[in-house]
Image (tube, rainbow, N blue to C red):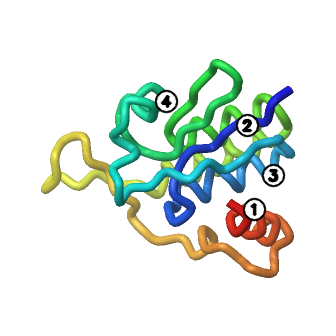
Amino acid sequence: MAPMKLYGSTMSWNMTRSALALEEAGADYEIVPINFATAEHKSPEHLARNPFDQVPALQDSDLYVWESRAICKYAARKHKPELLKAILRSQQWWMSGWRWRPTSTPLCWTPSSYSASSDLCLGDPLTRRLLRRILRS
């Protein structure tokens, strides 16, 4: 079976979140860089992967998944279902930390506080594996 392809910029937090989830789930994948400087994210090829011209986008055979949280759930469901409970618990906490900002548009939600736990720890083996993969791509 061919490895999944994760399209995006390695400088994107959402891309990093998706890659970490794929690593944690033990998925076989490769990172395919998208060049924003040349507007590659607006190309017809990328729009076929993600109609909103954003990254990340995951290709698994003929299935495309976009939005980092959807990619995280897909990776867990397919490769390591026991992670789903942990993902759902963390989302439950995260959603309780969000608040409505009436001065913004009705569709805008912002985190009420910054969580230092979202920082990457270079001593973490999972992070080191991800960094090696990024540096190879």
Q: Is residue 72 left or right of residue 96?
A: right
Q: What residue type is labelled 3?
A: Glu
Q: Looking at the picture, how far across and down is residue 45, in whole percent?
A: 45, 31
Alpha carbon separation for disc pair 1 and 2 = 17 Å
Residue assigned mark 4: 49
* Secondary element at image label 4: helix
Quadrant in which residue 38 is drawn: bottom left
* Secondary element at image label 3: helix
Dot 4 crowding, Cα within 10 Å, few <14, some 14–19, many 20+: many
User: Residue sitting at 80 percent across and 72 percent down?
Assistant: 128
Alpha carbon separation for disc pair 1 and 3 = 14 Å
Quadrant in which residue 75 is drawn: top right
Quadrant in which residue 78 is drawn: top right
Disc 3 + disc 2, Cβ < 8 Å? yes
* Secondary element at image label 1: helix
For discs 1 and 3, the disc positioned in front in the rendered view: 1
